[in-house]
Image (spheres, grey):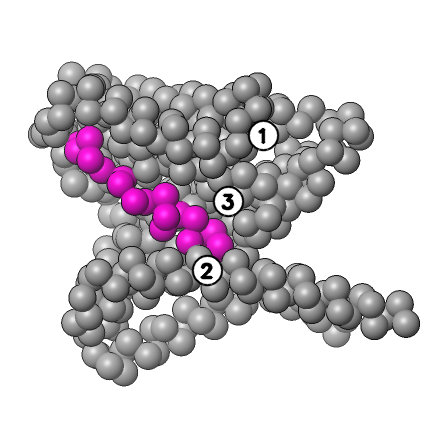
Amino acid sequence: MPSEFTNTIKRYSRELTIFVVLLLIIAVFSVQNPMYLDLDNLLDILEQASINGFLAIGVTFAIITSGIDLSVGSVMAVSIVACGQLAVLNLPPPVVLVLGLLLGIVLGSLNGLLITKMKLQPFIATLGTNSILRGVAYLITGGWPVLNIPRPFRNLFQIEMLPNIRLYTVYLILAAIVLAFILKKTSIGTYIYAIGSNEEATRLSGINVDRYKIIAYAICGLMAAVAGMVMLAKLGTGEPTAGQGYELNAIAAAAIGGASLAGGKGSILGTVLGALTLSALKIGLVVIGMDTFYQYIATGLIIVVAAYFEVIQAKISHFLSRRAQK
């Protein structure tokens, strides 16, 4: 029993560390300003973490394959304006929802095809589609926002399941559970991890690497579309400018959560905790009256520190393995 407990602690050491950091952040900001612990402020943290959480969960799949997706903000924007216009046409909300999800899958798969079939580097492919899709979002609306989103569509995400807990928070929890199961308990997840760890060895073992890369990016697009529909329902308007810079927050949340930017490592639980931590930090800076521009500095520093933490871990593991061999 003790050894099983110890193994569990080791297995989830990164997630436990993030959780402790999250508690420390809450404690530090609440000491500086007790208003930080107000219910409305905590709900703001949860709301901001929810939208970023959807994006970050998707990006985690791309990062685990040793890739990246810089287009999630633009996929989000296209989903917002496209679903907004469909909703304004009074299509049944479930139909708009399904079409929005399919749109996200198609756009994500497009990134996967560019990377696998055209042999583009993920950074270049998704940087290109980021610009293309942003232009598409503007073209769909002519640069104008989509206004007066019908209440029935908004209710798909905005209804309170519990006091002050919106339905989209429940969706985030369900998405995290389902995708964590796929990643940890199915062959899809096994192959995605294997691709990130050693793509060539995975290919030589007979695995269709291209197929599982496309699946990873399709999931990334799907989650970006969900994030877009959540924002559309929350604001009641669809802005083609929405989602700009959100890819940085998503990557930061995944990196905080332990997703190695070198690939082959990451977890959905860690990513969700990373999104909560990032949200708690950003809102904390606002609550204590610090200029919002510092949020960008904090986000960039977090990515650098999280990446360097992986380097330190690798050096420690290498050192311990050499000691063990002697």
Residue at x-position 37% and y-position 22%: 103
Residue at x-position 67% and y-position 62%: 314
Q: Which residue is mark 3?
A: 60
Q: Position of residue 81 (x, y in %)?
A: 22, 26
**Is 118 drawn above or below residue 196 in the view shown?**
above
**Is 73 drawn above or below residue 43 in the view shown?**
above
How busy is the neighbourhood of tag 1: few (under 14 within 10 Å), some, or many (20 plus)?
A: many
Find numbered disc 3 in the image and state the secondary structure of the residue it sits on.
helix
Q: Which mark is residue 213?
A: 1
Q: Position of residue 300 (x, y in %)?
A: 37, 58
- Alpha carbon distance from label 1 to label 2: 26 Å
- Alpha carbon distance from label 3 to label 1: 12 Å
**Per the image, is 251 magenta?**
yes
Do labels 1 and 2 touch, CB within 8 Å? no
**Is 89 drawn above or below residue 126 in the view shown?**
above
Find numbered disc 1 in the image and state the secondary structure of the residue it sits on.
helix
Instruction: Tell which of 37 and 140 is nearer to you.
Output: 140
Res 242 → quadrant: top left
Which quadrant of the figure contains the C terminus? bottom right
Residue at x-position 40% and y-position 33%: 127
Instruction: Tell which of 311 and 18 is nearer to you.
Output: 311
Residue kind at label 3, given as amino acid type = Thr
Residue kind at label 2, given as amino acid type = Val
Instruction: Tell which of 12 and 247 is nearer to you.
Output: 247
Q: Which residue is mark 2?
A: 304
**Per the image, is 271 magenta?**
no
Find numbered disc 2 in the image and state the secondary structure of the residue it sits on.
helix
Give whichever of discs 1 and 2 has the lower sequence position.
1
- Alpha carbon distance from label 2 to label 3: 17 Å
Q: Which residues are magenta?
A: 238-256
Give whichever of discs 3 and 1 has the lower sequence position.
3
Q: Is residue 45 left or right of residue 146?
A: right
